[in-house]
Image (cartoon, coloured by chain):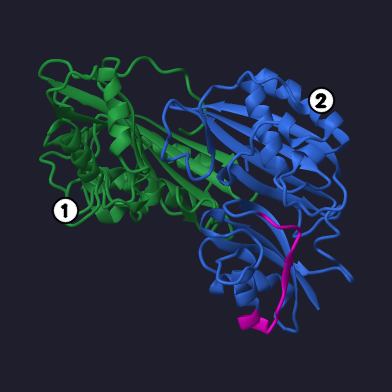
Chain colours: A blue, B green
Amino acid sequence: MNYLLLISYDGTDFSGWQQQPGKRTVQGVLEDAAEALFGAKRVTASGRTDAGVHALGQVVQFAAETKVPPEKLAACFNRLLPPDVRALASEAAPGGFDVTRAAKKKTYCYRAYYAETELPLYARYAARLKLRPDLSAMRKASGLLIGRHDFAAFRSSGATSKTSEREIYAVSVEEVKERHAAVYTVTVTGNGFLYNMVRILAGELFAVGCGKEEGITRAFLTGARGELAKTMPPQGLFLVNVDYGAPLFGAKEETHGIF
Amino acid sequence: MNYLLLISYDGTDFSGWQQQPGKRTVQGVLEDAAEALFGAKRVTASGRTDAGVHALGQVVQFAAETKVPPEKLAACFNRLLPPDVRALASEAAPGGFDVTRAAKKKTYCYRAYYAETELPLYARYAARLKLRPDLSAMRKASGLLIGRHDFAAFRSSGATSKTSEREIYAVSVEEVKERHAAVYTVTVTGNGFLYNMVRILAGELFAVGCGKEEGITRAFLTGARGELAKTMPPQGLFLVNVDYGAPLFGAKEETHGIF
C-alpha cells in the first residue's frame, strides 16, 4: 500500500532533500524513520529541495504494509523524526499514484529584507538586501515571467531536466514595513521549476528593484544565464505548497500572511 | 564620554543578558567587543532579558574615550560581534544619562502558534499552543491588565524588585491565520516589568482563550501566583522597544506587522 505524508522542515541543518552518503538529508531522516516503523526502504518527494531550503508543505510517498490507520501515520513518524522535520498529515495514496509525476503545480516563496545592518532575527529565514528595492519596478518585471516560456537562462549549471520549458501561473511581490526592516516576499506558482530557477528569478526581480536593467526579456530570447542577476542564497526559499489537482490532506482554511 | 547602542539579538544561544562566569551572555559578548575596541569595561542595558529571550530593540550604554564619530560606533561593534547580536545604531548619550533608570516605557511581544503538530519553521521564535484560543476571550481579559496595579502575582520567585506596582499602558492581541497554523501575538507596553511578568501574563491570556477561568481579577486581590496560568517558555518573547520619552537613534517610519 502506498501512503502520502505532508511534511514541513527547517532546511538550515540539512544538506537538502536528497539522500547522500555521510550527509544529513531530509530524505535520509525520513527513510530512517520509515524503515524503523514499517521496514519501508524508500521515501520519494514531489521534488528535491537544495541544501538550506525550507519546506512548509512538501509531499512525500512511501510504500508499507501496516494496520495503522492512514491518518495516524503522521504521528508515528513524528515520534521518530528530529524536531526540524515534522509530518503534518498522512493519508493513503490513490492507486498508481506517483508523487513526483502527479504534481500539477508548485508554489514557492522567496523572502528577503532590506535593512542597513544584518538583523539576527531575520537572518535564518530571509536573505538581506543591501539596497531598498522599488516595489513597482519589481512588480512590473514579475509580469514578464507569467505564461509558458523557455526558462533555459533561469537555471544553474548542473541542471539535468530534459526540457527547460515551464509555465508560470502567478507571481506576486509583497512588501511589509517592519520596525527596523522592509521585508519582501516573492511568491511564484508554476507547473514545475528548473534547478535554482526560483532563486534566480527572485534575484533578478530584487536586482531590477534596485536599479539593474531588466534582463528577463533578453534572457527568454538568448537563453543565456548571464542576462540575469545572481542566484539568491538558500535560506530565503520556502516550498510552500504542491498542488495535485485534487484535494489531499483535507481542505484548508483561507490563509493570510506570508505562509 | 557615554555612548548608546541600539542592539538586536537572537536569544536562542545565549544564557540571557547578564554576564555570568563560564556562560555565553549578550552582555558578555558586548563587553568583550567594547574592551577590544575602546578598553571599555562595562556595558549596561535598559534591563535584563532571560535565557532564550530575543530583542528587536534593546538599548545599551558604555563609556569610552574615542575619536570615532558616535554614529560610526555601531559598525565598529559589528566587526567584532557574533552574527546573533547586531548593533543597529549608535549615538552619544545625553549628559548624566542612565540607560536603566531613564527608560520610561518598554514594549514586549509574545508570539505563540496553534497547530495540530509542532511546526519546525515556527518553533524557534514562538511557543506552541495545543488548543486554539478564542481571540475575543483573550482581548476581554487583556483589558483587565491596563492601568496601575500591584502585579505581585505576576512574577516568578527569585524576583528582586522592591515594589511590584507597575503601570500597563496598552495590551493588544492579534491573530494571523496562516496555511498550517494560527499565530497569536500579545503586545504589551508598560513602565516596567517584573521577573517573568510578560511570560506569565501571556500564559494567563492564552489559558483564558483556551477555556480557563479568568484569574487576573483575583490575582490583583490576593497577589498569589497560583491564581494565574503557567509561565510561557522564553522563545516566544521579544523585547521590541525601549522608550526614553525623547527620540533616540533618529525617527523611525510607521511600521506594520509584528516587529
- Disc 1 marks a residue whose amino acid type is Gly
Disc 1 and disc 2 in contact, CB within 8 angstroms: no
Residue at image coords 73%, 84% = A67
State which mark lies toward you, 1 or 2: 2
Number of disc labels:
2
Q: Is residue A200 magenta?
A: no
Label at residue A204: none
Which amino acid does the dot numbered 2 rest on?
Answer: Thr
**Dot 1 corresponds to which residue?**
B158
Residue located 43% across and 52% down the image: B207
Q: Which of A184 and A53 lies nearest the eye of the viewer? A: A53
Q: Is residue A36 left or right of residue B232?
A: right
Decide if residue A254 is in sight here: no
Whole-percent x, y for residue B161 in the image:
13, 42
Q: Where, by quadrant of the figure, is residue A146 drawn?
A: top right
- x and y percent of residue A219 in the render? 80, 30
Q: Which residue corresponds to the image point at 72% horizontal and 47% vertical from the top-left? A: A157
Q: Quadrant of the N terminus of chain B?
A: top left
Q: Determine whether, in the image, residue B91 is placed left or right of residue B127.
A: left
Q: Which mark is residue A217?
A: 2
User: Which region is colored magenta?
Assistant: A35-49
Quarter of the picture containing the C terminus of chain B is top left
Determine which quarter of the picture holds residue A171.
top right
Q: Secondary structure at mark 1?
A: loop
Residue B123's place in the image compared with B172, above or below, is below
Q: Vertical placement of B21 versus A225: above or below? A: below
Tell me residue B144's x, y (percent): 36, 36
- Chain assignment, label 1: B
Tell me the distance, in whole angstroms, between the alpha carbons under discs 1 and 2: 65 Å
Query: Are labels 1 and 2 assigned to the same chain?
Result: no
Task: Please tell me in which quadrant of the rendered image residue A36 appears.
Answer: bottom right
Asked if A158 appears above or below A179 in the picture, the reply is below
